[in-house]
Image (spheres, rainbow, N blue to C red):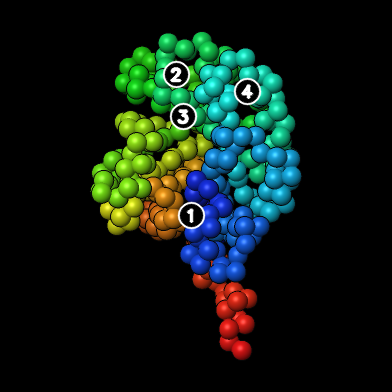
Amino acid sequence: MIDGYYLGCPIWSNKAWVGELFTLDAKASDFLRQYGRVFNTVEGNTSFYAVPPVNSVAAWADQAPADFRFCFKIPRAITHDRRLQNAEAESELFFQRMAPLGERLGPFLVQLPPSLGPQEWPVLTSFLVRLPPQYRYAVEVRHPDFFGAGEAEARLDQFLQDLGMDRVLFDSRPLRAADRSDPNVRRAQQRKPDLPVHPVALGPHPLVRYIADPNLPANDPWLREWAQRVAAWIEAGRQPFVFLHAPDDFYAPRLARRFHQLLSDHVDVGRLPPWPADEAPSSAEQLSLF
């Protein structure tokens, strides 16, 4: 079992993982249970686009292990459409809807639009201080001025630290170095921000979002760098969250497994459980023996 930190992918429901991560006979209703047998956290990107239905939240609470953590994104209707203003009703609905997950809730991700910068500092700070205090948060800024190593960045980091919030550490360097002849790479490069990496831990749960080169061996230099830093955080008493992305996310579980191997060279973080696809023959395979 994973120990000392949280490791996961940007999604848990991926049909392409049937036979890769999941058993050959896995259905969509099996995906979260099988994913949760290996990884102990996941990004909840689905909530960025819409507030999940009541029955979906109830199913997730039933299917996820007790020590599993969902890191859901706050809906874009709040962060992007309303730009953090006049969204009290939307915020109340969202947090009420997610509340049944209880202890399975990890930090909520506050992903801000690239155009929201220091000029909207009063709006940003007002929104953050009014977030429900019973939850944890990680803030992902994308405006270049928050990466200038100047007053704007120092003020942001100090404010988040004072609130006990974490800053999302977004690393797209591997994606930027990837072969652009791959259409998935080109699309991902167009969507993902190209910003400096300032790997400073502000709160108790540093949160890393790593965007990979689909050529898996090419990621090792960056993964080794992150393994050393995450190991230092763990040894300092922090409990990081690490999410591995790939342009089409098929290889995200493999990347996560490789990162765990590299991290294990520095600190004892337990053994990554076997993948359900490798653990035992599926029912279909068993029938084929007769």
Q: What kind of residue is marked 4? A: Leu
Instruction: Say whether residue 165 is left or right of residue 146.
Output: right
Task: Give the Cα distance between marks 1 and 3.
Answer: 26 Å
Q: Which mark is residue 131?
A: 4
Helix, strand or loop under label 1: loop
* Residue at (72, 31) in percent of width and height: 96
Q: Quadrant of residue 82?
A: top right
Residue beneath label 1, please? Answer: 269
**Disc 4 and disc 2: Cα gap in Å?**
18 Å
Counting residues from the start of the chain, the first of labels 4 and 1 encountered is 4
**Residue at position x 60%, y 45% in the image:** 69
| Number of residues whose C-alpha sits closer than 10 Å to that of mark 4, classed few (under 14), some (14–19) or many (20 or more) | some
Q: What label does residue 116 carry, if any?
A: 2
Question: Mark 3 falls on what kind of element?
Answer: strand
Residue 163 seen in this snapshot: no
State which quadrant residue 279 falls in.
bottom right
Mark found first going from the N terminus, 1 or 3 = 3
